[in-house]
Amino acid sequence: MHRPGIPAGVAVALLWTCVSLRAADVVQIVYGLNAPALQQYAANELGSQFERLFDDIYVTVVETPGDVSGTTVYVGSPQTNPYVARLRPDWPEVSNQGIVIRSFPDQRSHVVGGGSPVATMWAAYELGYRLGIRYLPRGDLFPAKKKSFDLDGVDTVMEPQLRSRTWRTINDFAIGPESWGINEHQQFLRQLAKMKFNRVMLAVYPWQPFVRYAFNGVEKSTATHWFDEKYPVDGDTVGRKAFGGKKMFENPDFSGLTTADERHEAGRQHMQALIDTAHELGMTVGVSIVPGEFPLEFQKALPGSVIAHQLKNLTITAGSDLGPADRTFRDLVAAKIRAYVETYPQLDRLYVSMPEFPTWGAHADQALHMLQQRGLSAELTMGKLQQMARDRDVIVSGDRGAQAIQGNLVGLAFFHVLFEDAGLLKRADGRSVELVIQSVDPALFSVLDQVVPGNAGTLNFLDYTARRSADNRHFIPQVPAAQVSSELIMTLADDNVGILPQSAVKSLSTLVDVIKQHGWAGYSTRYWVPGELDPAIYFLARASWDKELSGEQAVRELWTTATGNKAAADRLWKAWEHLETATDLIDRHAIGFTFPVPGMMMKHYHAEPIPEWWAEATDEYTQYMIELYRAQGAIDGDAKPVLFYYAKRGEYVLEYFAAVNAVRQAAIAREAGDTEQAIEYLETALEQTYNCINTLADVAQDQSDRGVIAVLNAYAYRPLLDEYEKLADAE
Amino acid sequence: MISTMQQAAKICAVMFVGVLFVASTKLHAEDWSQFRGPNATGIAAESTNPPVKFSTEHNVKWSAAPGKGVAGPIITDGRCFVTTMTDDGEFAVLGLNAVTGEQLWKTRFEVGKLPEITPPNEHASSTPASDGERVFVHFSTIGLIALDAATGDELWRYPLPLPFYLMGWGAANSPIVHDGMVIFNLDDDLNSYLIAVDVESGDVRWKADRPEMLGGYAVPVLCTANGRTDIVVAGSGKLKGYDPATGRELWTCNSLLRTIMTTPVVQNDRIYITVQSYGDTDRVLKYALLQWRDTNQDGKLAKDEVEPAFHKKFDDGDHNGDGFLVDDEIDDAFQAKTNRVGGGNIIQAIRGGGEGDVTDTHMIYNLHHQTPSNIASPLAYAGRLLMVKKGGISAAFSLEDGSTIWMKKRIRNFGNYYASPIAAGGRIYVPGENGKIVVLQSGPEPEVLARNDVGDSLVATPAIANNRIYVRTLNKIYCFSEEN
């Protein structure tokens, strides 16, 4: 064990004792007097890593250096550690994100530092990376064998290619981080810090319990999760072993809490802890809200509102009579925004989504006029914009595209008026929360700097999946990225493709290249189940600092180092190619195939021919699974259980496809009047669904995995069982 | 005279002890003292009214949480023995009062570096066996261990080589006790053998190598036929009979498949075995190895693609010495030339008591229905041979002639079946991995009496003794009974 913060004298005594007992390499890690907390943290992290990496090493982590023979690693910069300054190294010019790792062999010294305390922490992890540790979102993969202590050849000075590296979390649905307790979030954030992510975006929704506010005598009383879906666990729940005896699948931080007061308070604590942890790790934190939607109880407070049509219809929004200039509506939106700013006074950013107000179409011309008065080029007419939105090849196109651009214009005009009130984003400490406008329609990309209010940044969305976004990458150069800060939503795994294992490494690689070329600030992730995303996240993390790195290079390098087996690593790249092909097949043919909502399985229960692509996707997933089982059988060490987890999940998806096939065949048999055959197929579907859930439960490791199990029980197994029993009883 | 008197006294003493022993056997309660109870049949003959309905909250006589394990519990002389891996990574054997669940003792063993294992297998996977005075158990990194049944004190240990499996399955082999010997079969992919060790001294009595065998998990059974009791062991391709006194191979029936994870059952002079081994009959070992061990998929096995433990075998098979195993070289390295069998499904009845090759002479029937499980053993009960496989698909055949009684009927409990069915009092207990034990009424149809939920993964075959059922789930053990 290294000993953080042991006084130098004690450390010297310990070192002498140690030296006399064994021929260990003695390393002292010096973080300096009055060091920033992150610098001390970095020093302790370095110490822990050294002990796991090197044989026969004795590490002390100290404030001031002792007079000992051995190696000294100074942590920090000349500004934050006087011992670094005393070394008088040729300290390079680096930004506040720049990393510096320097060796001074003649002095048996090294410096691990950066342009800020957080950059120093990243430098410690960069050193760990260069020594063979592979950081992944759910843990570290250390080299299988320890080596002798040696830091030669690790000198580097690095600046990020993408300065904004945002991790989105919370979201919606039981399969996503909305299910994670704070402990799981914190563990994830600590890993993301190792991967040098520097922002967190908390994507929250109106019905969730993270903020409470009142308006016109109505107090927010809705405080629920997952679109208010409930997932009980009982003796008939398949894969219940994953739930550890709990009677209900729920976010552990809200376990057993029923009243709005209790849930709101738990929500506040949960989100505050997330913010605090991210800040401790040097990340900024933003909250992403849908500003124009409110829980149903606000119907009374907003005459003229309408129910927003979506899953379970949990929110209201402005009706057609309530235009963007409506004072009551604007005040309600402002009340909600103030609630976030005041509840979480350390918030750094506010992301506001473009409202989808189909009812506001009538106000579009007026909105366009207003935007033009505020600097938008008059050449862009409504006709031109609608034509662009109609003709494009993203999922929102045609009439939906034309409607979307109208809604966007009205929304932007509304934001211009709303954020004229500079006090709206003012924090208690006098600073202002940074505004980011999210998902402006791509038809407006070329004038993005002209349509967003003030100095707002943008977070831009091209399409649901990375593949679709990559296909539409021609929109990216249209953004005047020098004039307006622009980040791209990178979908790692899409909720429409659903609960099945997904990969998008190749498409992400394309997108990263393009945003780097065109000066975008960075990206924000989008995903629900972490599942197979390790290689994609690893690629994003490394490519953010590397001008040239491709997805394939990153994945091959990851597995080569983590497995220590080149042959296995080569095959693992093939595995991820199969997985991405399977993901693309679902995306192309049936986006929404396993969207985690009621009807997920039974929507296949209709008498139509079995689509050919089901067999193609099954084959791709089969190859994926085989590659993984084979690779995990060939290796030892930290990567083995990781590959086994993927392999089992590869097995589960095959069973899911077998179930879907059987459901379709049951429907065909039922249509043909062969009830007996239909029952047999439903039995097979039930069995395969059962097996798929059980297979997943064998390796479930996080709340997202458990969420998938809950969803599969609720939307696949139980409806199938109901149908089976209905047919069997009738027979 | 004196010597005669002494002799007589000795005889009297022996007779007295004998009478006491008989009396105690008469008095003592029903035992289930090895894997699957008496001779691995899965039948508790003296229990006439075991519980039908039970759960973690209903009809629980007692429960305990010994820790993780997948070995079955055994019951001997009022004691219940279970094994577990402790939280700090030690192997432990526990002695419990079978009536109250009170822990009598717990003996721990350091195990060193543990070998690879594939779930649902766990390291505490060997079901103990007991002769009433001692408890015997196997652990992969230790060998055979004997403990005092009353105190848990270690009496002796007999080191055995660490088993190796080409597919990384891990060990899960269980001993039996017969005629003063612990009989233990271990078929792995390196050095398969059957061994007999003296129960008192721990000295080896004999050892029979089984070089033709690949990794497998059949427990030895005893078959009395032709006035002789043989030890019968199922293994790759072959069912073999051994002389218990010497370990000499007496007969072989070359009718089995490649991978044998089930244990045969004996009734009268017949041995019944059901096997599912993956792949068809032509799929010999090389295909599996090329699919799963050829890491770079170049169609040949390189030396570094197999564990170092197998390198000697590798060299033996590498006829041209090019450092690769290609095509038949793979089978030559790992599978005996005399025993190249593939996969499939078999349901066989074989008469015991033979000599030499009995394949053609002692086979009573050999069926190929796709009904056997690859892991759960069959139950020979009330004239029927019952089997349940993944998905809760059951089938039954006449013990007498193999005719179908029912074919592929679901017992309405999906999932995997690793534990084997057991029976008592006309009731059949089918334990599913999902923790549901389906109780069937023994009869010409699979009539379900109850589906009982024991709340946790269930891989170990339960035990029945004295109308109580002992269920060892992954983490706990329950004694269910309808006694108040």
Image (spheres, coloured by chain):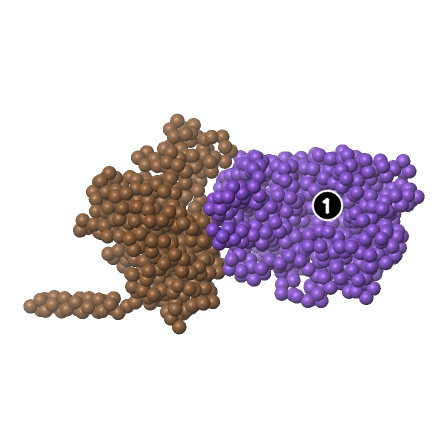
Chain colours: A purple, B brown
Residue under pointer 1: A524
Chain for disc number 1: A
User: Callout 1, which amino acid?
Assistant: Ser
Q: Position of residue A8 (x, y in %)?
A: 67, 57
Q: Nearer the viewer, residue A720 or A271?
A: A720
Q: Position of residue A71 (x, y in %)?
A: 64, 48
Q: Is residue B49 left or right of residue A237?
A: left
Q: Is residue B244 visible in the rendered structure shown here? A: no
Please state, as top left, top right, bottom left or bottom right, where the C terminus of chain B lies in the image.
bottom left
Vertical placement of B228 versus A233: above or below? above
Q: Position of residue B53 (x, y in %)?
A: 42, 64
Q: Is residue A685 visible in the rendered structure shown here? A: yes
Q: Is residue A347 left or right of residue A505?
A: right
Q: Residue sitting at 44 percent across and 56 percent down? A: B458
Q: Quadrant of residue B134?
A: bottom left
Q: Nearer the viewer, residue B138 or B442?
A: B442
Q: Is residue A731 left or right of residue B30?
A: right
Q: Position of residue B459 (x, y in %)?
A: 43, 54
Q: Residue sitting at 74 percent across and 40 percent down? A: A396
Q: Residue sitting at 81 percent across and 45 percent down? A: A407
Q: Quadrant of residue A426?
A: bottom right
Q: Is residue B262 left or right of residue A546?
A: left
Question: Dot 1: what SS?
Answer: strand
Q: Nearer the viewer, residue A710 or A33?
A: A710
Q: Quadrant of residue A612?
A: top right
Q: Residue sitting at 82 percent across and 57 percent down? A: A304
Q: Nearer the viewer, residue B277 or A683?
A: A683
Please state, as top left, top right, bottom left or bottom right, where the N terminus of chain B lies in the image.
bottom left
How many marks can you see?
Answer: 1
